[in-house]
Amino acid sequence: MPPSLESVAGTSERALIEIEGRTMLARVVDSLRETTAVTRIICIATPLALQSLDSDVVGLAAGERMTGNLFSGARAAQSERILIVTADAPLVSGRTWMQFLDGAAVNLLDAAYPIVPKKAVEAQFPGGKRTYGHLKEGSFTGGNAFLLPRDRLESLEEVIDRAFAARKNPLALARMLGAGFIFRAATKKLTIHEVETKISRLLGCRSGAVIVPDAAIAFDVDKPSDLETAREFAAKMASESQNEENSFLK
């Protein structure tokens, strides 16, 4: 965790940062409990974070490699489709996870990734800085989740390992994706369909992006300003929920 974030977080564990009386990890777990399509929750975390989990969550110790952690959790799952999410996405609701999963199902996708239009992000979280991909259809940012097919884990791990290793090496990335693909991306001429076709070939399964309208799926806590925004947003949500409850009681 960046020192600047740790200095205001009150903990050295990102997953254990508190927002409205609950840790980010607890908020993510609760959102998954609200997701009707999720039948089992597996958490890969440090020993300290694992101690905070309730008994209905399967806890596995995290290793040093991010991709290794990802796939150790995926292998422990028992479903045909595996939803992988990060612990620093504290504002997502079960309804939003279902928007993503339903979109993948409607499009018959084996592997899927949520994307959010820039306009939606700026409307919901004005002033925040995000990384955007510029496609022919518009600008999008990626969400904090993946949907993967269990029967393709071995081949997927190899490809994702290569992509992760090449992420900061333009030459290696060009070899993997193709120079023409990268040129079209740089000139903002790529379409969503072209990206989906390329990723499907790399992964060996039907893959695609799911446009999700709720920007919370793309919001994570990386810096102090993110934490401030998360706490303000969560407090507003809690207040609105309390007002609705009070109105109902009247």
Image (tube, rainbow, N blue to C red):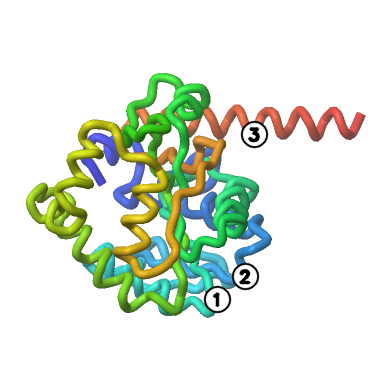
- Residue drawn at (68%, 61%), measured in percent from left and top? 36
Q: Is residue 240 above or below residue 145?
A: above
The local secondary structure at tag 2 comes to loop
User: x, y (%) of residue 240?
Assistant: 69, 28
- Residue drawn at (42%, 73%), measured in percent from left and top? 74
CA gap between label 3 and label 2 equals 26 Å
Which of discs 1 and 2 lies nearer the camera? The answer is: 1
Q: Residue furthest right?
A: 250
Type of the residue with mark 3: Ala
Specify few, some or many for label 3: CA neighbours under 10 Å numbering under 14, 14-19, or 20 or more. few
Query: Which numbered disc covers residue 87?
Result: none
Q: Earlier in the sequence, mark 3 or mark 2?
A: 2
Type of the residue with mark 2: Thr
140 and 34: which is toward the camera? 140
Specify few, some or many for label 1: CA neighbours under 10 Å numbering under 14, 14-19, or 20 or more. some
Residue bearing mark 2: 39
Q: Are marks 3 and 2 in contact (CB under 8 Å)?
A: no
Residue bearing mark 1: 79
User: x, y (%) of residue 2?
Assistant: 23, 42
Q: Are marks 1 and 3 in contact (CB under 8 Å)?
A: no
Q: Residue furthest left?
A: 171
Q: Earlier in the sequence, mark 1 or mark 2?
A: 2
Report the side of 172 relative to 198 (left or right): left
Q: Are marks 1 and 2 in contact (CB under 8 Å)?
A: yes
Type of the residue with mark 1: Ser
Residue bearing mark 3: 238
Q: Residue furthest top?
A: 127
The local secondary structure at tag 1 comes to loop
- Residue drawn at (23%, 39%), measured in percent from left and top? 184
